[in-house]
């Protein structure tokens, strides 16, 4: 499963699909705030869905 990091908060999230994290953030709204990270990165988001 792919993972992305939210740059302003430095949180790593799981991707549900190419546009949404598992906890519901739409990464297409502010794409400059998101960066793809490797699958070996640890998920740091504590919200439902990601953790």
Image (cartoon, grey):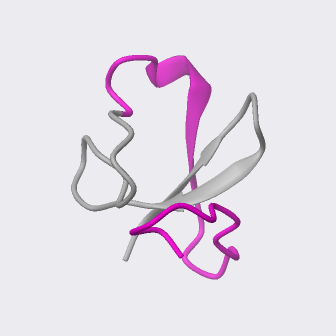
Depth check: give the residue in front, 38 or 51: 51
- As drawn, is 18 to the left or to the right of 35? left
Outermost residue on the bottom side: it is: 40
Q: 9 above or below 16? A: above
Task: Give x and y (percent) for residue 50.
Answer: 47, 68
Magenta run includes residue 38: yes
Depth check: give the residue in front, 50 or 1: 50
Residue shown at 59% from the left, 69% from the top: 38
Outermost residue on the front side: it is: 48
Residue shown at 39% from the left, 69% from the top: 49
Q: Which residues are magenta?
A: 27-51
Task: Give x and y (percent) for residue 20.
Answer: 29, 45
Location of the N terminus by quadrant is bottom left
Count of number-bearing discs: 0
Task: Give x and y (percent) for residue 47.
Answer: 53, 61
In the figure, residue 9 lies in which quadrant?
top right
- As drawn, is 16 to the left or to the right of 25? left
Give the overall secondary structure of the magenta segment: loop
Magenta run includes residue 10: no
In the figure, residue 44 lies in which quadrant?
bottom right
Q: 1 above or below 13? A: below
Q: 17 above or below 43? A: above
């Amino acid at each position: 499963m792919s993972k992305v990091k939210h740059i302003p908060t430095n949180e790593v999230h799981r991707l549900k699909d190419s546009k949404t994290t598992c906890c519901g953030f739409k990464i297409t709204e502010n794409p400059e705030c998101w960066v793809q990270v490797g699958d070996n990165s640890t998920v740091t988001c504590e919200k439902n869905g990601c953790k």
